[in-house]
Image (cartoon, rainbow, N blue to C red):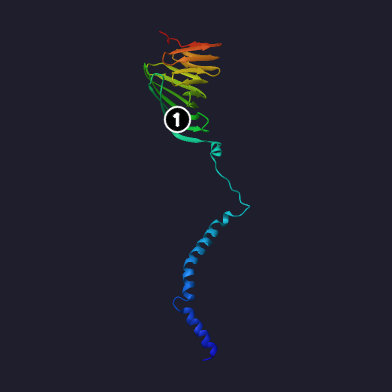
């Protein structure tokens, strides 16, 4: 065996001795390798987002409020009380609120149920808006009102105030009651007192035998 081989074997033996450089290297790698692997995985995970050509954005509250529709609800139901503390409810097939700053709900298939001194009453409309601040319904098309004692009123271009049980027109109005049909430039009505007032070119066609 050559002298050179003896030297190499002696060096390997020293390297493998307990507490030698081999042991120190193993201890260092045992700590360093997991850290290196973790850093490498992190780089691989986030590298798709590091391209400077990609677009990024931050979603803030101001941008949320500018959304096209803030809230959409199916089969919506709202409950409240009138000026006398009597309960009423308003239901709709759908309701849309465009933003939190807008108190209006755009509603379809509206149905209202009201408690009145002369019994329960209902109102219905195909489409309209409900103002949550004033509790007023503005109808696009005809609104039908019927009280428990037989009083009925159908009118176009009207607003119904749930708190006071009153109705008013916001344009030329036409409609009908049990008495007959009418049209006028303006109309106000007290649903509980069953009083309808027509103003401005009012015309009323009375049904024969309706008034007794």
Task: Identify the image quadrant of the C terminus.
Answer: top left
Measured as percent of width and height from the top left, residue 52 is found at 62, 53
Measured as percent of width and height from the top left, residue 83 is found at 41, 19
In the image, residue 19 above or below residue 160: below
- Residue at the far top: name it: 212
Residue that badge 1 annotates = 92
Quadrant position of residue 201: top right
Q: Residue at x 44, y 32 (%)?
A: 76
Within-10-Å neighbours for mark 1: few <14, some 14–19, many 20+: many
- Residue at the far right: name it: 53
Quadrant position of residue 17: bottom left
Between 63 and 179, the one nearer to me in the picture: 63
Between 125 and 112, the one nearer to me in the picture: 112
Measured as percent of width and height from the top left, residue 120 is found at 37, 20
Between 188 and 33, the one nearer to me in the picture: 33
- Residue at the far bottom: name it: 1
Measured as percent of width and height from the top left, residue 70 is found at 51, 36
Between 57 and 159, the one nearer to me in the picture: 57
Q: How many labels does the image show?
A: 1
Q: What element carries label 1?
A: strand
Q: Residue at x 53, y 14 (%)?
A: 186
In the image, residue 101 above or below residue 171: below
């Amino acid at each position: 065996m050559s002298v050179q081989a003896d030297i190499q074997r002696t060096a390997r033996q020293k390297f493998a001795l307990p507490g030698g450089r081999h042991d120190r290297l193993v201890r260092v790698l045992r700590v360093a390798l997991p850290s290196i692997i973790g850093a490498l995985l992190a780089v691989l995970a986030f590298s798709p987002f590091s391209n400077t050509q990609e677009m990024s954005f931050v979603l803030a509250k101001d941008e949320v409020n500018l959304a096209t529709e803030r809230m959409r609800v199916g089969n919506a139901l709202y409950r409240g009380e009138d000026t006398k503390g009597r309960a009423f409810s308003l239901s709709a097939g759908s309701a849309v609120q465009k933003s939190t700053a807008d108190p209006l709900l755009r509603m379809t298939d509206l149905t209202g149920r009201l408690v009145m001194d002369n019994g329960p009453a209902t109102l219905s409309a195909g489409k309209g808006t409900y103002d949550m601040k004033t509790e007023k319904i503005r109808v696009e098309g005809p609104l039908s009102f019927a009280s428990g004692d037989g009083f009925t009123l159908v009118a176009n271009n009207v607003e119904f105030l749930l708190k006071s049980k009153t109705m008013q027109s916001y344009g030329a109005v036409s409609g009908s009651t049990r008495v007959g049909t009418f049209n006028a430039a303006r109309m106000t009505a007290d649903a509980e007192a069953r009083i309808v007032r027509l103003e401005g070119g009012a015309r009323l066609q009375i049904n024969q035998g309706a008034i007794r």
